[in-house]
């Protein structure tokens, strides 16, 4: 059987890769029917816990949410973010990646950065731990969330970083808020797929935070498109429930013992 990784790699230049985030089983189950990759991203710190940055997310939080997601993901490739301060050196990276894989049974881990984390990625790949890269805006260390790749020096560094990650053996790279023409150039210049978020149509695939696209997380940023307003749907259902409770219409006999 073609491995899940080969399937993703083979999509390059053929068909777009669909990637979405999930933090729990029920949403993961819905997404799994339609996506190639399900990502348990550390942006859950902001979406679920109201943290100002992903820096406060812990490995235990990632593991608990991933265990729930694992129960909903059957066919997609499941990737889990290694959170801030869990891969500061190769030993730490290996210990924590093994812990995440062993406890969550995910297929791969994602780390933010290029040549700065060369040794950490190298040790993971050497130990047969599949790695997804992440370049551009790096929320775990970013001082600003401005798009990357407008300055020539930044463009050259990002191109070099993408090459470094490819040579290290990562199976794909998330490009976050990378300027369109640079995302196109990176995508053309490496053999592994790029997955964009705010990085244009030129990437091999796209990722969005599911809570943003279904309108559950009230974020307003340029790269998010809201495909549904689930908050409105939930509100309507809750109001109906409230009214039936108040008016003694629920529960009926059929709902009682
Ligand atoms: O944490 C996350 O959800 C991510 C995506 C935005 C790519 O890293």
Image (spheres, rainbow, N blue to C red):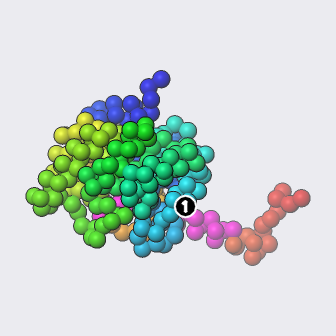
**Callout 1 crowding tier (Cα within 10 Å): few <14, some 14–19, many ≥20:** few
* Location of residue 170 by image quarter: top left
What stretch of residues is rendered in magenta? 222-241
The extreme right residue here reads: 257
Q: Which residue matches tag 1?
A: 61
Task: Judge whether residue 64 is colored magenta.
Answer: no
Tell me, yes or no, if residue 235 can be seen here.
yes
Task: Give how far across and how far down residue 207 sits, in percent.
Answer: 37, 51
Residue ID at (34%, 34%): 9
Q: Is residue 167 left or right of residue 153?
A: right
Task: Give how far across and how far down residue 36 sits, in percent.
Answer: 43, 40
Q: Main secondary structure of the magenta part?
A: helix
The extreme bottom residue here reads: 246
Q: Secondary structure at mark 1?
A: helix
Q: Nearer the viewer, residue 149 or 223?
A: 149
Task: Give how far across and how far down residue 45 sits, in percent.
Answer: 47, 66
The extreme top residue here reads: 1
Residue ID at (42%, 62%): 85
Q: Is residue 6 left or right of residue 1?
A: left
Compared to residue 63, the image places residue 33 above or below, namely: above
Q: Nearer the viewer, residue 79 or 31?
A: 79
Q: Where is the C terminus found, in terms of image quarters?
A: bottom right
Q: Nearer the viewer, residue 139 or 216?
A: 139
Q: Is residue 206 left or right of residue 161?
A: right
Task: Give how far across and how far down residue 155 sits, in percent.
Answer: 15, 55
Tell me, yes or no, if residue 183 can be seen here.
no
Q: Is residue 137 left or right of residue 245?
A: left
* Location of residue 171 by image quarter: top left
């Amino acid at each position: 059987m073609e491995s899940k990784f080969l399937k993703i790699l083979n999509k390059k230049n053929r068909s777009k890769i669909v990637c979405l985030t999930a933090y729990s089983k029920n949403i993961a189950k819905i997404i799994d029917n339609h996506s190639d990759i399900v990502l348990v991203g550390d942006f859950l710190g902001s979406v679920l816990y109201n943290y100002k940055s992903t820096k406060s997310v812990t490995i235990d939080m990632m593991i608990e949410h991933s265990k729930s997601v694992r129960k909903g993901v059957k066919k997609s490739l499941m990737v889990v973010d290694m959170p801030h301060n869990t891969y500061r050196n190769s030993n730490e990276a290996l210990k924590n990646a093994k812990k995440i894989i062993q406890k969550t049974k995910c297929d791969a881990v994602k780390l933010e950065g290029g040549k700065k984390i060369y040794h950490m990625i190298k040790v993971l790949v050497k130990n047969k731990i599949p790695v997804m890269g992440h370049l551009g805006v790096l929320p775990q260390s970013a001082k600003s969330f401005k798009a990357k790749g407008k300055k020539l020096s930044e463009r050259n560094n990002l191109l070099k970083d993408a090459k470094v990650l490819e040579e290290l053996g990562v199976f794909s790279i998330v490009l976050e808020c990378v300027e369109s023409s640079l995302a196109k150039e990176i995508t053309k210049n490496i053999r592994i797929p790029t997955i964009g978020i705010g990085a244009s149509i030129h990437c091999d695939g796209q990722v969005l935070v599911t809570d943003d696209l279904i309108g559950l997380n009230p974020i307003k940023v340029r790269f998010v498109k809201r495909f549904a307003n689930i908050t409105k749907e939930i509100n309507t259902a809750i109001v109906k429930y409230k009214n039936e409770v108040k008016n003694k219409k629920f529960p009926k006999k059929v709902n009682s013992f």
